[in-house]
Image: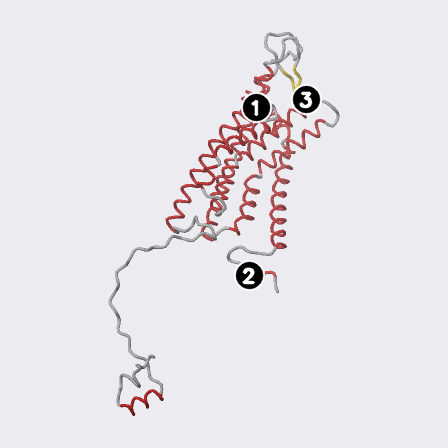
Amino acid sequence: MPKSARKQEKDPEGRMPLAAHLRELRNRLLKSVLAMGVVTVIAMWQYDAIAHFITGPVIDTVGCPSGTTATTPRDHPCAQVTANGLLAPFTILLKLSLTTGVVGASPVWLYQLWAFLAPGLHRTEKKYALSFVGAGVPLFLGGAYLAYAVLPTTAGALVGLTPGDWANFFPADEFFDIVTRMIVVFGLAFELPLLLVLLNFGGVLTGRRILGWWRFMVLGITVFAALATPTGDPLTMGLLAAPIVVLYFGAVGICLFNDRRRKLGNPDAELSDDEASELDLKPSAVGEIESVSSGRMLPEQASGEAESGDTGRRGGFDDVT
């Protein structure tokens, strides 16, 4: 069978064999990796500009003034970014470029994620693809920007704990490890509310059930923020946990609204497969009774009635019985 013909024989409900699912996943992953690779190559070309862009706010906050070093006596401690080791500049180049590739290609891999999950949704729910990507990209970039924005404040708070006779040197590879980890973790954490909305629109979770988890969700978000922040300080942890909690309750509101909309169109939408729907026992008015004509008699019935002279009954029985 030609390949074009096979493409036209797709199940309207998105069902396909396991091998087809694996091929679909492979194709989506290849497209995502290719997009990340292109952005990574461009980031390598602009490596100096990206490195100064990331380190600039931190250096402005805790860096030593021009003409001084971290060992120069002063009232307030300062820090210097250093590259330790022969391979440190090359390692930093790869890490920065790959992180830029993940962030820059987020519209592509978010769309590929949706395209892989969309066949499992109803036809009326696939129209939310652009909304999913349109909300997912700003959320991911918003989380990444929050990590970038709080990093100078976090660095200033931590450097301020340095005793007066100590010097601060930031190894560049360790510094960029913290930066890249915070950017990716903050960005992915901001996708949690979108994932809950996606599961709700797919009919997996109801808004009422998601709301019932709010205590465990708040506790889990707090623990996740404590483990995900490389610095481990309460300020950064709170700055990560608070927006996610707010987004979680916003996602709950969207899910509850979607459940209400779905229930208006289908009152039995929230019932499980083994749960019976409610019966409408309200009596209704009976309409006009229609007359029913008698059916045609069999030949032996007609001959019997002709002999008995009774056209309505034969042998004490009517035509039906």
Identify the image quadrant of residue 207.
Answer: top left
As helix, strand or loop, the secondary structure at mark 3 comes to strand
Q: Earlier in the sequence, mark 1 or mark 3?
A: 1
Q: Check disc 3 and report the residue beneath it.
A: 171
Q: In this rendering, is residue 154 above or below 18?
A: above
In the displayed image of the protein, which residue is found farthest to the left?
A: 288
Q: Check disc 1 and report the residue beneath it.
A: 151
Name which residue type carries label 2: Glu
As measured in the structure, the alpha-carbon distance from the residue carrying label 1 to the one carrying label 3 is: 16 Å
Q: Check disc 2 and report the residue beneath it.
A: 9
Name which residue type carries label 3: Pro
As helix, strand or loop, the secondary structure at mark 2 comes to loop
Rendered location of residue 265, percent (x, y): 38, 51
- The C terminus - image quarter: bottom left
Rendered location of residue 294, percent (x, y): 30, 79
Q: In this rendering, is residue 65 above or below 292?
A: above
